[in-house]
Amino acid sequence: MKFENTEIEKLKADLNRLDEVMLDHGLVREGQWDYERVTYDRKFELKEGVFYLRVRGHAIEGDIGAHKATIQLMTPLLGKHYYPHGVEYGEGENFPTSLVNQCKKILDAVKAEVSKFAL
């Protein structure tokens, strides 16, 4: 599911500061990057299954590998993991309301913090 109208997709920010804010909210980048794209994930293990809140971004300037980049954030996603196939974000997925609300709170907090230093 896409989290439309969060305004996160309007933000551009320094990679290093973005990494700090995302990690403060449980969204980790780890090895999920290449020289042009980043992906921050937060895992939720519920009785209904395993879910991931994902915030993606791409470099509009600089080099992610060198830790010197400006990142344009993209529309956040919520997906359900199916072993061994991967994560599905489709319209047909059923996401617990409590999880969706928790993700919205996380995204609101991330947006508020990143907005302070966004470019």
Image (cartoon, helix red, strand yellow):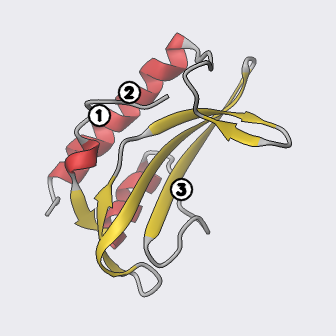
Residue that carries the numbered disc 1 in the rendered image:
108
Of all residues, the one furthest to the front in this rendering is: 91
- Could you tell me which quadrant the C terminus lies in? bottom left
Q: In this view, does 75 lie to the left or right of 111?
A: right
Label 3, secondary structure: give it: loop
Q: Quadrant of residue 14?
A: bottom left
Q: Quadrant of residue 63?
A: bottom left
Of all residues, the one furthest to the bottom in this rendering is: 66
Residue that carries the numbered disc 3 in the rendered image:
28
Provide residue 69's location: percent of width, then percent of height.
32, 77
Badge 1 crowding class, 10 Å Cα cut-off, few under 14, some 14 to 19, many 20 or more, is: some
| Distance from Cα at disc 1 to Cα at disc 2 | 6 Å
Q: In this view, does 60 lie to the left or right of 118?
A: right
Residue that carries the numbered disc 2 in the rendered image:
104
Q: Give the answer, above or below, for where 93 lies relative to 107.
A: above
Q: Which of 18 and 63 is in front in this view?
A: 63
